[in-house]
Amino acid sequence: MPEFEVTPWEVTGVVDYNKLIEEFGTTPLTDDLLKKTEELTKKELPMYFKRKFFFSHRDYDLVLKDYEAGKGFFLYTGRGPSGPMHIGHIIPFFATKWLQENFGVNLYVQITDDEKFLFKPQLTFEGTKRWAYENILDIIAVGFDPDKTFIFQDSEFTKIYEMAIPIAKKVTYSMAKAVFGFNEQSKIGMIFFPAIQAAPTFFEEKRSLIPAAIDQDPYWRIQRDFAESLGYYKTAALHSKFVPGLMGLGGKMSASKPETAIYLTDDPEEAGKKIWKYALTGGRATAKEQRELGGEPDKCVVFKWLEIFFEPDEKKLLERYIACKNGEILCGQCKRYLIEKVQNFLKEHQEKREKAKKEIEKFKYTGDLAREQWDKAIPEPLRK
Amino acid sequence: MPEFEVTPWEVTGVVDYNKLIEEFGTTPLTDDLLKKTEELTKKELPMYFKRKFFFSHRDYDLVLKDYEAGKGFFLYTGRGPSGPMHIGHIIPFFATKWLQENFGVNLYVQITDDEKFLFKPQLTFEGTKRWAYENILDIIAVGFDPDKTFIFQDSEFTKIYEMAIPIAKKVTYSMAKAVFGFNEQSKIGMIFFPAIQAAPTFFEEKRSLIPAAIDQDPYWRIQRDFAESLGYYKTAALHSKFVPGLMGLGGKMSASKPETAIYLTDDPEEAGKKIWKYALTGGRATAKEQRELGGEPDKCVVFKWLEIFFEPDEKKLLERYIACKNGEILCGQCKRYLIEKVQNFLKEHQEKREKAKKEIEKFKYTGDLAREQWDKAIPEPLRK
């Protein structure tokens, strides 16, 4: 049995990210590329990049070259709306927001309600559309530019179907089967879906950059196989590591194990209790032992969450690491610190989420970028 | 080798239509049903029905019952735009027009530019879209009601994608393979297409009636398998025989053999020459022999064309049949008669086709039915 396994459907074990780079054939995100990012944006890098939460890429070097040459690029990411979003889902959106803000580029967010309905036997179409609405609120709450961001649901912005057709003429059943593991019982909608997912990489005649967890990479390999034959760019990607669930560093935070996840709509009080009860730490058996031997922050989910998202302050993070190693702080202290951070985040997020209800129309239909895309989709005699 | 074979892709041999009814498991279009049609419409039946050019059906009896009970029904038909339309393509549209006019029902015409692009390796998307425009002119020229007819191209009225999704969740690769003959090398767009073709049967919450040549029947079998599980009606169908090409009664008029077909855009002069040169008749070796033995109208393409479309007058058709049998007329006379009929038809059609250019917008976007459908497809904030 392998120590860890990463597919678009499942992540198990404690992932060795260097091995993964080799296995997937991607490229490490080097310090040079990060420095270049800093130079071009004239901004200090956010923790997601500085701490190598994003650790791997495809063609990000070319994205930066295109940007430098004035050709520009655009961002593309997405969400499959089959349930509430948790902290693991939203973190890549914050990284994406930083990229949009500091490169000043357009962002397309595909809400794949078609995919989730097709792939989840028990989910109704109405059900996934309701989740789409809920998830869009969370995404808007991150704070994207409403005139440079187009959030679209596949079931609604069906122009995506027309764009998928030339792609669907390039991909054989055999190719799709190899990448996505289809079989005789797969529904024909599932088999077609890879074309729908690749289509947004053609929204502009520029290179698209997809920031997402590395398990999503296989979805883009097909795109990179045929893109140039259709006169488009191979998509670029920035790959993140996984946000672990509360109960262990292995795998990733999973909606199917609710006790390991903090949902964006969780009551902050309840979220605190969940962390207190379930969060795995790198602590020793007793307080005495911990003071003598020191803690193990590298094995600690609490520390990992601080590192990934909840402690943006570099100095404080390092101090905490050392204090733990030296046995100067106990797990309870760290848990309480994380709980406060998470609760503040949730409160703030939930307020923004409430305000997002008024912004949906702009992101989906009437903002500059949304309008531009809909104008391509609606025949002229029917346009407002 | 079978004497004849009928699949959605090919028709070979002289078809035994009674055998076909058995083979396909359809129902003969009885005199009772035709009488009922006459009663309900209070109209004399057109030649297509009277002469049993439409000879078979599925659930047409239920369509008439629904109509009688005030539930109504709607018509659905289509065209795959991969080239110019010929006489064989347009005749079912005339029968459809009669049904629309005399039952006063809505008609949806699906122009499957997606299908043709996907299935024809050498066709470009632009190419099939251009054919869509040309074919739509021919269809409009038939004289449908612009407020009760919605002509839509799949690549443009992409709402069809959303409607296809629940269907595409019902159909497995294995089912699609069995009906359509897909294999490992089939493109994923082809595999999905059956869902797109079935979607218009759900445009209204009434029974849909599809008038089409019987070789298209397999496409609807899948629809009839899952329709009720999605809360819709199994589609009904009226099946026509094939319009033979000029050179023989076997097979059907085919765009791939241009010398056997009369195109709707053919110059009438040239069309006449083609008929004169290529039309197979039931004539004898010599005029003398023919006067003695009589001709064989049942083996004659010229007579068949008169019967199917070009001689609406029952009495005249019968007289010609008898005169031929009795050796009283020669093939040249019949050919000249048909040529005149075809030329008149082409001239009239081509005039109407020219006028259709000004009507396209109404059929596709702004007529009552088109507008109603687009309103469902365009989000409210973007609607005119």
Image (cartoon, coloured by chain):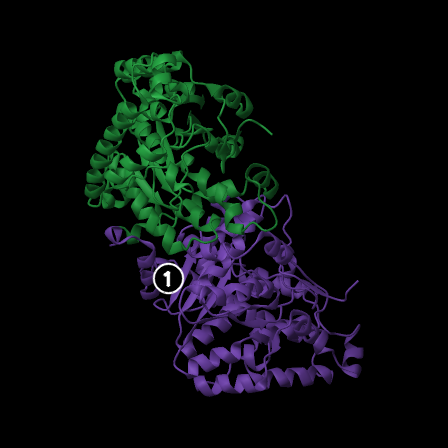
Chain colours: A green, B purple
* Residue B293 to residue A250: above or below: below
* Residue B125 to residue A227: above or below: below
Task: State the image coordinates of residue A262 (x, y, percent, origin top left).
Answer: 33, 37
User: Helix, strand or loop at disc 1?
Assistant: helix
Can residue A271 be seen?
Answer: yes
* Residue A38 to residue A82: above or below: above
Q: Residue at x 38, y 34 (%)?
A: A77
* Residue B362 to residue A94: above or below: below
Q: Quadrant of residue B354?
A: bottom left
Q: Looking at the image, which is closer to me, B344 or A142? A: A142
Task: State the image coordinates of residue B58 (x, y, percent, origin top left).
Answer: 56, 74
Task: State the image coordinates of residue A145 (x, y, percent, origin top left).
Answer: 24, 33
Pick the quarter of the image with the N terminus of chain A.
top right
Direction from residue A6 to residue B218 in the image, left or right: right
Q: Residue at x 50, y 58 (%)?
A: B197
What residue is pinned by disc 1? B363
Q: Residue at x 38, y 41 (%)?
A: A258
Q: Looking at the image, which is closer to me, A6 or B158? A: A6
Can residue A230 be seen?
Answer: no
What chain does badge 1 belong to? B
Direction from residue A328 to residue B3 in the image, left or right: right
